[in-house]
Image: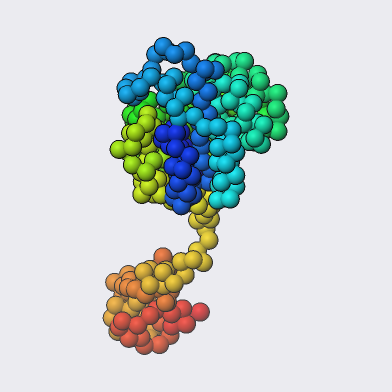
Amino acid sequence: MTVKVIAEIGSVHDGSYGNSKKLIDLAKNCGADIVKFQYHIAEFESMKNAISPSYFSDEERFDYFKRTSFTDTQWKGLINYCKKKKIEFLCSVFSIEAFKNLLSLGVKSFKIPSGEVTNLPLLEEISRYKKIRIFLSTGMSNISEIEKAYKILKRDSLIIMQCTSLYPCPNNMVGINVIDELKKKFKNCQIGFSDHTMDNVSALLAASKGSNYFEKHITFSRQMYGSDAKFASEPEDFKTYCKSLKQANSILSSKVNKNNLKPFIGMRKIFQKSIIYAQNLKKDEKIKLNNIKFLKPDSGISANKYKTVLGKKLKKNVKRSTFVKYSDFYA
């Protein structure tokens, strides 16, 4: 299994094309495999007076989407910049128009955000294109809604992301148990984890359940303007996030044969014990338990074989604090 980390840039760029490129650089330098943007076309996504989430307090979402949107030329520039930096471009689409625009620019990977899972016209339009990869977020959907979306989008390249649309997500709402449920129900899909917690513990637990795609918001600083910045990971935290997941993947992918002792030959010799004579003994004496002791190193007869020497008759005199040998005894 190969772990892929998605750096969710979202809207933390605040409409700056230059900052978007810098965020791509940051994601790449931190160890991310994929960068994800969000493509909002305000008039095709929201009414002007639509309710905004609590973290949109400084301006209306409709106005924010208008202000921070990119032109097709800028989107193409970001796609090409990702190619140059050898990091994959991924984008969430919130309307059919956004999807078609990106498709025309050559984008091959799309994410359906949690709020669009019940937008069946969007899903049906996306489903027409069989060669694209789709990430399906599930942060505010029940199993029935996910099943309906799955039936529409079904393909080998569909990744279902366990997600909780709370920012930040509290520990008791992460839903690691849901990963097992999704794996059981959607056997032909990879199950990823969209992480809105403030650390990497949940992601490591998700990795242990078999998730291989991990999404996390990234920012230069949580002090930046925008709806995403307050809940995103700053550079050092994100770098640790990527490193920890790659390390976890290495551990989980490495199957250990407990019966293979070759790696421990040297350690066993140092730390395990041999049978040692506890006293000077004369020829023809029979070995009793009080005649022997057990000391490091394990260079003679191992302590776990002590019963094989009890009752044995010596064919020569032996000295205290020397290794017991089978050659000391009559056959």
Residue sitting nearer the eye, 201 or 128: 128
Q: Return the x and y of residue 126 as percentages of the image width and height.
A: 65, 24
- Colour logic: rainbow
Above/below status of 309 relative to 114: below
Give the residue displayed 41% in from the left and 49% down from the top: 239
Residue placed most toward the observer, 13 or 150: 13
Q: Which residue does the image show at 60% across and 47% down from the upper left?
A: 83
* Residue at image point 41% right, 72% down: 269
* Quadrant in which the N terminus appears: top right
| Camera-side residue of 237 and 73 | 73
Q: Residue at x 48, y 16 (%)?
A: 46
* Whether residue 106 is situated above or below residue 277 in the rendered picture: above
Q: As drawn, is 20 to the left or to the right of 221?
A: right
Task: Give the residue at the far bottom of this rendering.
Answer: 317
Image position of 267 (left or right of 76)? left
Q: Quadrant of residue 318?
A: bottom left
State the image coordinates of residue 87 (x, y, percent, origin top left): 55, 47
